[in-house]
Amino acid sequence: MKSREFPCLVVGLACLVSCSDRRNSSDTGGKGTASAPPVLGMYVHEGWPYNHPYAARTWTIDDWRGYADGLKRLGYNTMAIWPALEITTQPLSPSDRANIEKTAEVIDVLHHEFGMRVFIIRGW
């Protein structure tokens, strides 16, 4: 692990924990805080340069659905995705643009089809 990757991981994990503890009193009808379900999350790094199916960047929407379905069946309710935006070229290459758009669609699928929380992790 490179020295700059560790702080990103720590910040992402801290965000997962702190965001899971925030509950609105309206969840309990104004009678205090609700007992939030525990956060059980998975971290997915899209920057690893492996071949399909070992690199998340190569996954199709259906691959993501299958992965999320397996996680959901195991009790997971949160996913943290690092799309490695800090290493994209400026202007964006067609493949980087397509991956960003796919990641946005994946987030919609995770929210609407699986009821998962999603956090985007970014590097330094």
Image: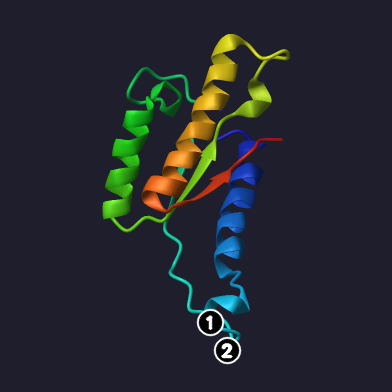
Q: Residue furthest bottom?
A: 31
Q: Nearer the viewer, residue 99 or 52?
A: 99
Q: In the displayed structure, does residue 92 sit left or right of residue 74?
A: right
Relative image position of residue 103 (x, y in whole percent): 51, 31
Q: Are marks 2 and 1 in contact (CB under 8 Å)?
A: yes
- Give the number of the disc on residue 31: 2
Q: Residue at x 61, y 56 (%)?
A: 15
- Residue 116 x %, y %: 44, 52
Question: What residue do we see at 73% from left, 14% from top?
Answer: 90
In the image: residue 4, left or right of residue 57: right
Q: Assign the N terminus to one quadrant of the image.
A: top right
What's the amino acid at mark 2?
Lys
Quadrant placement of the C terminus: top right
101 relative position to 90: left or right:
left
What residue did someone put label 1 on? Answer: 28
Measured along the vertical axis of the image, is residue 42 above or below residue 4? below
The relative height of residue 98 versus residue 28 in the rendered view (above or below) is: above
Q: From the viewer's perspective, is residue 48 above or below residue 21?
A: above
Crowd rating for badge 2 (residues with CA inside 10 Å; few <14, some 14–19, many 20+): few
Residue 44 visible here:
no
Q: Nearer the viewer, residue 58 or 5?
A: 58
Give the residue drawn at x 58%, y 10%.
Answer: 94
The image shows residue 26 at horizontal and vertical percentages of 59, 77
Residue type at mark 1: give it.
Answer: Thr
Q: Residue at x 55, y 64 (%)?
A: 20
